[in-house]
Image (cartoon, helix red, strand yellow):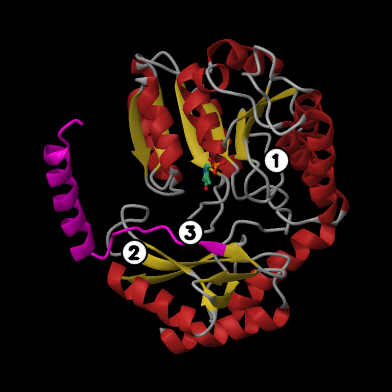
Amino acid sequence: MRDMSAFEMDFSEERRHRQDRGLWRELAVYEPEQGMEVVLEGKRLVNFSSNDYFGMTQHPEVIKAAQEAIATYGVGAGASRFVTGNHAYYDMLEAMLAEHYHTEAACVFGSGYMASIGVIPALVGKGDLVVSDKLAHACLLDGIKLSGAKHMRFHHNDMGSLNRILLRNHEFYDKCLIVTETVFSMDGDLAPLSDIGKLARKYDAAVMADNAHGFGLVPPSDAVDVHMGTLSKALGGYGGYVCGSEALVAHLHQKARSLVYTTALPPSVVAGNAQAIDCIVKDKALVENALKHAKAFTGALALPEAESLIVPVVIGGAEGAVNASEKLKDKGFLVSAIRPPTVPEGKARLRVTFSSLHTKEQVEALAKAVKEVM
Ligand SMILES: *Cc1c(COP(=O)(O)O)cnc(C)c1O
């Protein structure tokens, strides 16, 4: 056996360091119950930490579509999309995504993370510039890093800051790509996409927006050239996607390594994703109800009115956030504490997410409990 002692010494040092600062992560097992209830370590909790915004992980029509696909195609795709893994459900799902975003084409990836690390290096490289919002998701940063392009960051949603960076730098690079999120995953606020689009036109830059938390909520913006997103949150399944021009998607087929060198998604997953889009488009009440819950919560706590299904309750220190989350657990609510490095130092928070599957009573009870633990 190889001697791991040198590695493990590093591990234990890292562990002490993280535990001291309240940053140590551990996995727990969650058992699903009715609606948004879960059982964790034998205790029944109402889940306010899930990204299953419209109940699509358990929608009967989505389950049925996935089961039928398994009955016909089996459980796995068996190969990459460019070998023999590209089943018919992909065509259906990509057509639905392109229609939703009003784009010529779409390309489905293994996950949102894989879409990001595939598309950015396919678009830019050495000699190009990527300017990203300071709060952009880790998978966007990883994609930028992999691309080898020069990376600069603008202050969150600050168009003056973005303008200054583009003004001073754009002429020194071949291509410029602006990267942002539509709904920010840890703050729940929205990007000013049409203003970003104006700056992009001024400096001849392209815009990529990660819509991981906005599907069904944020209407697709013309200002965006590259729409990226996940099938794993609002759509309740798994996978990621990029929507844009025919030329962009054909280019991704050639160049996106995280598309080419990985196995296709299981047919049942893709069939479920397609059915979930259909359910969300057909039933407008799903989105309305979820947003109503988020607004009721911010109203009850006198927070700025929710713009999305993500509401941050900023606590400050990592330990304080973890304590508040633990106290909420004692009261029967699962609300995750988000700590650095996911959010900036001193901005640790409770991150509350709302779903159409929550009940009005559950939301009211949560607001009361949060007041008590603050
Ligand atoms: C969750 C998330 C992703 C990654 O999507 P997955 O399909 O889970 O890999 C990308 N961007 C943002 C903003 C996210 O919140």
Toward the viewer: 12 or 285? 12
Q: What is the x, y in percent for residue 206?
A: 54, 25
Mark 2 CB lies closer than 8 A to ligand 1? no
Q: Quadrant of residue 23?
A: bottom left
Name the disc covering residue 129, or none.
Answer: none
The N terminus - image quarter: top left
- Amino acid carrying mark 3 in the image: Asp
* Crowdedness near tag 3: few (<14), some (14–19) or many (≥20) residues, C-alpha within 10 Å: many
Query: Which residue in the structure is indicated by mark 1?
Result: 220
Which dot, 1 or 2, sits closer to the camera? 2
Q: Residue placed at 39% from the left, 18% from the top?
A: 128
The C terminus - image quarter: bottom left
> Is the residue under label 1 in contact with that under label 3 (CB below 8 Å)?
no
Q: What is the x, y in percent for residue 172?
A: 33, 16
Q: Residue placed at 49% from the left, 82% from the top?
A: 370
Toward the viewer: 199 or 349? 349
Mark 3 lies on a secondary structure that is: loop
Query: Which residue in the structure is indicated by mark 3?
Result: 187
Q: Which residues are magenta?
A: 1-30
| Separation of marks 1 and 2 at Cα, in angstroms | 30 Å
Q: Quadrant of residue 362?
A: bottom right
- Amino acid carrying mark 1 in the image: Pro
- Amino acid carrying mark 2 in the image: Lys
